[in-house]
Image (cartoon, rainbow, N blue to C red):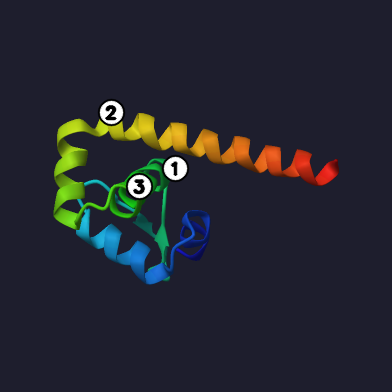
Amino acid sequence: MGEVAAELGENTSAVRYWSNYFEQMVKPQRNAKGNRLYHPEDLETLRQIQYLLKNQGLTLEGARLRLSEDRATVEKRVKVLGMLKEIREDLVQVKKSL
């Protein structure tokens, strides 16, 4: 849970809440201790949820509807946003090295 929250830049309670609210789409496994273990598909879905909530300003219900209606478009936009962030980080590193 902590690793997923750190990857997303969110606190663990937000990730836990999203997992519970979007239980049809995010299905983490539990280990013997009861800790949530997320698969890469779950992490991608959480990224999409984060994008819809934080970048698009949708409510939880709005995000749920958007994912159920047009998930492919959301997935593409999240991937493009991720690539742009990586490019920006690379450019910042280049600028520092100059």
Q: Where is residue 62 shown, x and y percent of the image?
A: 16, 49
Q: Which mark is residue 40?
A: 1
Name the residue rendered at 26%, 53% in the picture. 57
Mark closer to the chain start, 2 or 3? 3
Q: Nearer the viewer, residue 98 or 39?
A: 98
Q: Which mark is residue 51?
A: 3
Residue, disc 2: 72
Name the residue rendered at 41%, 52% in the picture. 38
How far apart in space, not on screen, are marks 2 and 3 (Cα)?
A: 14 Å
Q: Disc 2 vs disc 3: which is toward the camera?
A: 3
Mark closer to the chain start, 1 or 2? 1
Q: Where is residue 23 shown, x and y percent of the image?
A: 22, 54
Q: Nearer the viewer, residue 74 or 19?
A: 74
Mark closer to the chain start, 1 or 3? 1
Label 2: how many Cα within 10 Å (few below 14, some 14–19, many 20+): few
Name the residue rendered at 41%, 67% in the picture. 35
Query: Do tag 1 and tag 2 residues touch (Cβ < 8 Å)?
Result: no
Q: Disc 1 vs disc 2: which is toward the camera?
A: 2
Q: Is mark 3 on a helix, strand or loop?
A: helix
| Quadrant including the C terminus | top right
Amino acid identity at mark 1 = Pro
Quarter where residue 31 is shown: bottom left
Q: What element carries label 1?
A: helix
Q: How many marks?
A: 3
Query: Do tag 1 and tag 3 residues touch (Cβ < 8 Å)?
Result: no
Name the residue rendered at 24%, 46% in the picture. 25
Quarter where residue 68 is shown: top left
Q: Where is residue 48 shown, x and y percent of the image?
A: 34, 44
